[in-house]
Amino acid sequence: MRQVLMGNHAVSWGATLSRVQVIAAYPITPQTQVVELLSEICAEKKLDAKFIKVESEHSAMAACIGASMTGARAFTATSAQGLALMHEMLHWASGARTPVVMANINRAMTPPWTIWTDQNDSLSERDTGWMQVYCQNNQEVLDSVIQAYKVSERILLPTMVILDAFVLSHTMEVVDMPEQEMVDTYLPPFKPEYKLDPEDPHAFGGLTGPDGYFELRYIMQDAMEQAKSEWEKTGKEFGEMFGREYGLVETYKADDADFLIISSATIASTARVAVDRLRERGMKIGILRIRVFRPFPVERVREIVSSVKKAMVIDRNISFGASGIFYQEVKAAMYNVSNRPPIFGIVTGLGGRDVGVRDIIQMVEDVDKMDSPRSDIIFKGVRI
Amino acid sequence: MIRTTIPQEEVLQSGHLACPGCGASIAMRYALKALGRNTSLDIPACCWSVIDGPFPHSAVGVPLYHTAFETAASVASGVRAGYDILGKKDVNVVAWAGDGGTYDIGIQALSGAAERNDDILYVCYDNEAYMNTGIQRSSATPWGAWTTTTPVKHPKDRPKKDLVAIFAAHRIPYIATVTVAYPEDFVKKFQKAKDIKGTKFILILSPCPPGWKTRPEDTIKLSRLAVQTRIFPLLEIEKGIDWKLTMKVKKPVPVIEYLKLQGRFRHLTEEDVKYVQKSVDWEWELLMKKIENK
């Protein structure tokens, strides 16, 4: 059934179709509508779930972890400062191997006060052991919530489904709503092997010395590695059942490309129009969109980037004192590949400044004139 | 044979790592006797995160989730919701935290759970300082006490936070105070709490020999003296307004009898002791008014 949905409501329906059992959430602009709609859905009993209206995001994540430990499917959503407040519990969720799924609406970090999009909130949580999926449209948002539970519950690591503030969160798009029965087939109930259970009592998370901790972290990294094929496999299954296939990455006209734009989220979808226009001028150009950022799809990136003559990463984020973060990751992935092209790093659109087709065309034209990058950051659109 | 109201079954097993004379380990033993095996614990950073034993050991005999310092209440809320939605509504969900995790860093999450009236039992074993990190002051540390962050030259100059009044103000269905010197009262209150829906809060005064500088064999005596001096009245408060004394103290023991057994008060002058006595008398008067005004 096709419906017109804003990104936030696509999240709510994704959670509803996933039959989440415990929701714990706290309001923050631009995420609030996610939990408002879920409150209504729960109140109308369209979803059999417990909704805990917690007093902070820190408690939201703590409650999700507690619920997940009993074997319930837990969900929350947040943004920016809320995500930062959760930071401690993000480590707790992954370290405890609880498959919590959370939507994060990408919002720039304060101060100064801001509510508009960039990726510095979620990328600041890069090393917490959460999987991260960056979505390019509202359909993908809804589908990714469902897929995230499937992957998370198989490998026991939490997933953050990420969408741009306003560009997706408050923008209406046509979304095909999957049938509940088919979602139930795709995503069976959560049945963890180990959980809190008075009939089979165990202690979880007790003091672990240097003789045991290292192995637990090794196993976590191993799970992340396995997750790569899980995302591809379950993305293919999703395609077979619902007609929309998802992978770790997505390419657009990249097969014969000499010039590759690498980006994520909605900038990558805007770049398609830029690529079409540049192709009309005869330029052999394509796109690599990184959808799953953690686990980082190193193999896919190497395979695609090594076949082009020039690559340009567009980052809507910055690691202060270094460069754009996707840029660092792509460069790191390519370092040990012998036939790597020069890779340029653009930082743009921070704090929600619009990044349009013309901006992207201009970035390409500028980079096309250069043989190699003169610095690790090429700022685009900053007025100084 | 003396008949007792305390269940015979031992849920807490031997082999835990508490210090000799630890009030908190005796408290856990009585609490689990009262609550039984159909109980699920979560414990934030506190002495009990060590006492239960390192991975893969556990002494409590019921499921236990170790969680972050400020999340005892919020994790319990989530555990409750999880059990409920899975149809295990009869499990006693218990958050078990120290005074640091309750009076200080965890008070926000506990206030949230109490305001929502989530169906959990929150237990604070109050040893009146951050004992697990080496005896630093908390907002539960009493006036005049030495800790490593309130040294003898500058002992704590503020009174202990009145947490019972704070949670009474949340109008939760049940609040009680207990000590291990009165096990029948202790067990009765836990059993009562178990059968009440909503947020229950039980405060245990928990002597700590290394932190209070007391003899391990004095733990029960101190627990009794705290009540008999009126420093720690044994209470029950229903719906936040119905205050009741469960142990009447007609002839109070002077506070000096309690203070003099504890190294943490050794530096107090006669004047200081008089001040403590005056404060205790004043607090008692205030409490009597609450009880009369119910």
Image: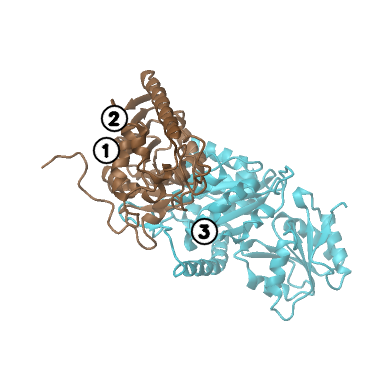
State the cyan chain.
A
Write the residue at 70% across / 72% down.
A304
Residues at discs 1 and 2 in contact (Cβ within 8 Å) = yes
Q: Are marks 3 and 1 on the same chain?
A: no
For mark 3, what is the residue?
A94
Q: CA distance from mark 3 to mark 1?
A: 42 Å
Image mark 2: chain: B
Colour setup of the view: by chain
Whether residue B227 is situated above or below residue A170 in the rendered picture: above
Of badges 3 and 1, the one in the foreground is: 1
Q: Is residue B104 visible?
A: yes
Whether residue B229 is situated above or below residue B80 in the rendered picture: above
Q: CA distance from mark 1 to mark 2?
A: 9 Å
Write the residue at 59% across / 42% down.
A34
For mark 1, what is the residue?
B182
Percent from the top left, x then y, of residue A101?
54, 53
Nearer the observer, B115 or B202: B202
Nearer the observer, B171 or A196: B171
For mark 2, what is the residue?
B247
Nearer the observer, B105 or B254: B254
